[in-house]
Amino acid sequence: MSIKRIVKDTALGVVKGAIMVAVFVYIVPYIIRVVVGLPTEIPSPITYIVFLALFMGIGIAERYVIYPIKLPIRFLNMMLGIAILFSILGSGYVVQAIPLGSISITVEIDFSILLYTITVGLVLISIVLLPRDED
């Protein structure tokens, strides 16, 4: 394996890890928070660094292993993303008190179906992408 190939594979792994963090830690929670209007937990900066390191490590490892071993690594990548979504979005059950003058209305929203739909979609995407081999 040449130095050029090693640098290329490492860079691609780092970029893939950064993209995964952007999708799972920033974009999907932002869409759920802004578009859907549901609250999300904002992770601490150290949590972002840990997620970034995990995704980059998995991305780099995926570039260097042979094909049959890539399958569980790709699946692990998606499962880690799903775990991050569940940790950021909580259990999918929101209770919010809305003050209206002298009274307060309590609104309960169960958006766990949305979380499960995202989970199923991501699992299906990872299964569809599993047979693909870049080499």
Image: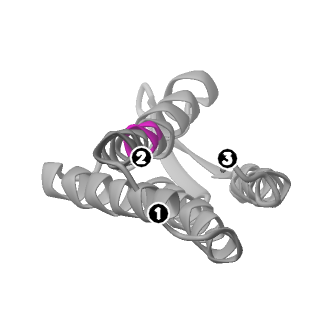
Q: Quadrant of residue 112?
A: bottom right
Please identify the dominant SS of the magenta region. helix
Camera-nearest residue between 77 and 83: 77
**Disc 3 packing (10 Å; few <14; some 14–19; many ≥20):** few
Q: Among all residues in the image, which is located at the extreme front? A: 2
CA gap, disc 3 to disc 2? Answer: 11 Å
Q: Amino acid at mark 2?
A: Asp
Where does residue 69 sit, x and y in percent of width and height?
A: 63, 77
**Disc 2 packing (10 Å; few <14; some 14–19; many ≥20):** some
Contact between marks 3 and 1 (CB within 8 A): the answer is: no
- Image: magenta residue range: 15-19
The residue at the point 30 percent across, 52 percent down is 52
Contact between marks 1 and 2 (CB within 8 A): the answer is: yes
| 55 in the magenta segment | no
Q: Amino acid at mark 1?
A: Tyr
The N terminus: image quadrant: bottom left
Which element type, helix, strand or loop, lies under badge 2? helix
Mark 3 and mark 2 lie on one chain; the one further toward the N terminus is 2
User: Is residue 67 visible to the viewer in this orientation of the structure?
Assistant: yes
The residue at the point 42 percent across, 25 percent down is 101
Mark 1 and mark 2 lie on one chain; the one further toward the N terminus is 2
Where does residue 8 sit, x and y in percent of width and height?
A: 38, 39
Which element type, helix, strand or loop, lies under badge 1? helix
Where residue 134 is drawn, which disc sits there?
3
Where does residue 117 sit, x and y in percent of width and height?
A: 80, 52
Where does label 2 land, which residue?
9
| 16 in the magenta segment | yes
Q: Is residue 91 above or below residue 51?
A: below
Where does label 1 land, which residue?
64
Q: Is residue 64 left or right of residue 41?
A: right
Q: Amino acid at mark 3?
A: Glu
